[in-house]
Image (cartoon, rainbow, N blue to C red):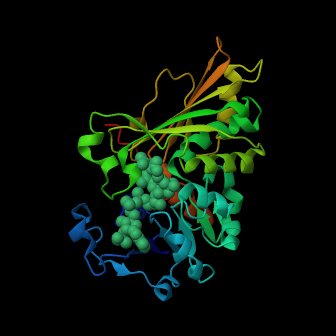
Amino acid sequence: MKVGIIGATGYGGLELIRFLHTHPEVEKLELFTSSDEGTIFSSRFGHLLTIHDDSLKKIDEDTLASFDVVFTSTPSGVTSKLLPPLVGSGPKLIDLSGDYRLKQPELYKEWYKKEPAPFELLQESVYGLTEWNEKQIKDAKIIANPGCYPTAVLLSILPLIKEKLIDPNYLIIDAKSGVSGAGNKPSQATHFSETNENFSIYKINEHQHIPEIEQAIQLFTDVNTTVTFNTHLVPMTRGILSTTYAPAITGVTEKQLNECLVETYKNDPFVRVISGASSLGTNRVKGSNFCDISIKLDERTNRVTIISVIDNLVKGAAGQAIQNMNVQFGLPQTHGLNLVPLFI
Ligand SMILES: NC(=O)C1=CN([C@@H]2O[C@H](COP(=O)(O)OP(=O)(O)OC[C@H]3O[C@@H](n4cnc5c(N)ncnc54)[C@H](OP(=O)(O)O)[C@@H]3O)[C@@H](O)[C@H]2O)C=CC1
Ligand SMILES: CC(=O)N[C@@H](CCC(=O)OP(=O)(O)O)C(=O)O
């Protein structure tokens, strides 16, 4: 397979490279840039010396048309304009940004404060939450790879909503992320001296992943609801931990909740259900494509605590994107993704 990456110099792009270099079906990997044409990739990213010594190429529609797959890992507002000429030109398109996730253009405008992608393409794109949308992903021309937070949240709550074990009307989601979630562009919010030894909440009730989570709940469970979703920045590089609080439906037991998760994901190689965990941390999935989920029913309040952990750059971005590519090409989902978590 001939694979191209636009945005290869960013964090998501670098992770795509890390996995695609070990992928058994990838014969050619070409990297594209909007700002650094001609630079030898390993001269800029020394850790890739002898692994990727080719130069960065200019983004060019005709060149890209000859590829089997093109991943775009660019800031929001880029692929809404970049991808339309490429649709139908040859390659399957897998977009890691938020530009093709929301079906309603006005929602994108409202939450991203940018101009949306063309309406027809928004309708044509397929939401790439692999474990929940495999059939549609197989035939998709454009895959809208899910956001990092929505991936962690949705994988953990969708089964329980679908099986009517929790009340979807009172979902409170409290999520925390490492700083790499904000990308490689330095900013005040990601400045070392302001993130180190600090723990902060941000975008309070205004996070752009709120409509994405609500849309996906509707898509996969037919439930129309709103969620309270807040995000926190943790002074670490990678990882997301999401905690959702939801009322259990009266009479539901912790055993039923666990069984529901186990049953849902019994054939999914990257979702691990941890029964009865008393603690769960991001280091158990670091560097890997795993999503680990655990639940606990508080019998005193009849509320369920639903916890999930992912690596934001892997299952939350590049790993899931490659998992989707594997599905599209009829390959095992694990191809190129069989890495053991780093843990320390
Ligand atoms: N970081 C994360 O954990 C996650 C990120 N995402 C989303 O994935 C996308 C990429 O994220 P991330 O890798 O962190 O971002 P980065 O900011 O680290 O990298 C983005 C890359 O995009 C390229 N780029 C910038 N502007 C343009 C442009 N106008 N046209 C073409 N390419 C451009 C740049 O490379 P160059 O200058 O070489 O062109 C840059 O290195 C974003 O939309 C992000 O929201 C999704 C899930 C998780
Ligand atoms: C820590 C941090 O800042 N995370 C980013 C995640 C952004 C992201 O992945 O954005 P899209 O999925 O919308 O492209 C944020 O909260 O905005």
Q: Which residue: 42% across, 32% down?
A: 281
Q: Nearer the viewer, residue 148 or 284?
A: 148
Q: Position of residue 134 (x, y in %)?
A: 67, 57
What is the total number of numbered labels drawn onto the structure image?
A: 0
Q: Position of residue 254 (x, y in %)?
A: 66, 21
What is the quadrant of residue 271 in the picture?
Answer: top right
Which residue ends up furthest to the top in the rendered image? 300
Does residue 186 appear left or right of residue 315 in this picture?
left
Q: From what the image shows, is residue 300 above or below residue 174?
A: above
Observer-nearest of 335 and 58: 58
Q: Which one is in front, 258 or 38?
A: 38
The vertical placement of 216 against 202, above or below, is below
Q: Quadrant of residue 128?
A: bottom right
Q: Position of residue 40 (x, y in %)?
A: 25, 76
Q: Please say whether residue 7 is visible from this viewpoint.
A: no
Position of residue 234 in the picture relative to residue 265 (left or right): left
Does 172 sit above or below residue 28? above
The quadrant in which the C terminus is found is top left
Q: Residue at x 38, y 43 (%)?
A: 178
Q: Residue furthest bottom?
A: 62
Q: Residue at x 31, y 34 (%)?
A: 198
Horizontal and vertical percent position of residue 74: 44, 66
In the picture, measured across the screen, residue 134 lies left or right of residue 223, that is left
Residue 136 in view here = yes
Observer-nearest of 135 and 162:
162
